[in-house]
Image (cartoon, grey):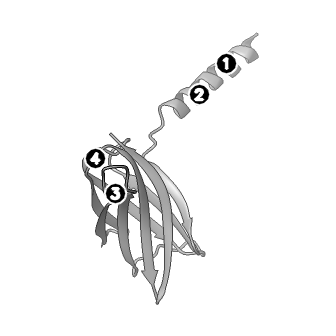
């Protein structure tokens, strides 16, 4: 009976950890790079959103000499033109930091464009701004 109670407790802890885990970190591949994007809010909001971007090469070494541009775009809809906002990310403490403005609620296509040594790679994902 004791084994089952420990199993139940462990299961509850694991499920609770999953349910309450923050969803503000995204991990993507961009060419030979591994990219981790962490937004300052659990869910992006209308207005300014800060993010930290950690880029590693295929050997797992931090990339600190790239040009990094963050883009948020929303396709056109009936009666509304397409929207886009870009921000240059600045290297601070081994991570790239940027602020991106989302002008309205809804689904935004996000991208991080990495340019290093004449080569460019892009990580893409989608967020829902509230």
Residue situated furthest top in the rendering: 1
Q: Disc 2 marks which residue?
A: 15
Callout in the foreground (4, 3):
4
Spatial separation of the CA atoms under disc 1 and disc 2:
11 Å
Callout in the foreground (4, 2):
4
Q: Residue at x 52, y 57 (%)?
A: 27
Q: Give the image location of residue 83, x and y in percent.
A: 31, 59
Which badge, 1 or 2, is on the more N-terminal residue? 1
Which badge, 4 or 1, is on the more N-terminal residue? 1
Q: Give the image location of residue 36, x and y in percent.
A: 48, 60
Task: Report crowding for label 2: few under 14, some 14 to 19, many 20 or more residues within 10 A (C-alpha).
Answer: few
Which badge, 4 or 3, is on the more N-terminal residue? 3
Which quadrant of the rendered structure holds the C terminus?
top left
Q: Disc 3 marks which residue?
A: 51
Q: Residue at x 31, y 69 (%)?
A: 89
Which badge, 3 or 2, is on the more N-terminal residue? 2
Q: Disc 1 marks which residue?
A: 8
> Which structural element holds mark 1?
helix
Q: Residue at x 40, y 57 (%)?
A: 75
């Amino acid at each position: 009976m004791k084994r089952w109670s420990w199993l139940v407790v462990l299961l509850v802890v694991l499920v609770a950890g999953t349910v309450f885990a923050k969803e503000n970190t995204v991990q993507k591949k961009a060419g030979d790079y591994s990219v981790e994007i962490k937004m300052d809010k659990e869910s992006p909001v209308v207005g300014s959103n800060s993010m930290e971007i950690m880029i590693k090469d295929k050997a797992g070494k931090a990339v600190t000499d790239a040009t990094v541009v963050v883009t948020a775009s929303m396709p056109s809809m009936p009666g509304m033109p397409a929207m886009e906002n870009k921000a240059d990310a600045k290297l601070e403490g081994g991570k790239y930091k940027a602020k991106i403005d989302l002008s309205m609620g809804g689904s935004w296509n996000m991208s991080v464009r990495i340019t290093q040594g004449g080569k460019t790679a892009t990580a893409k994902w989608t967020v829902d701004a509230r």
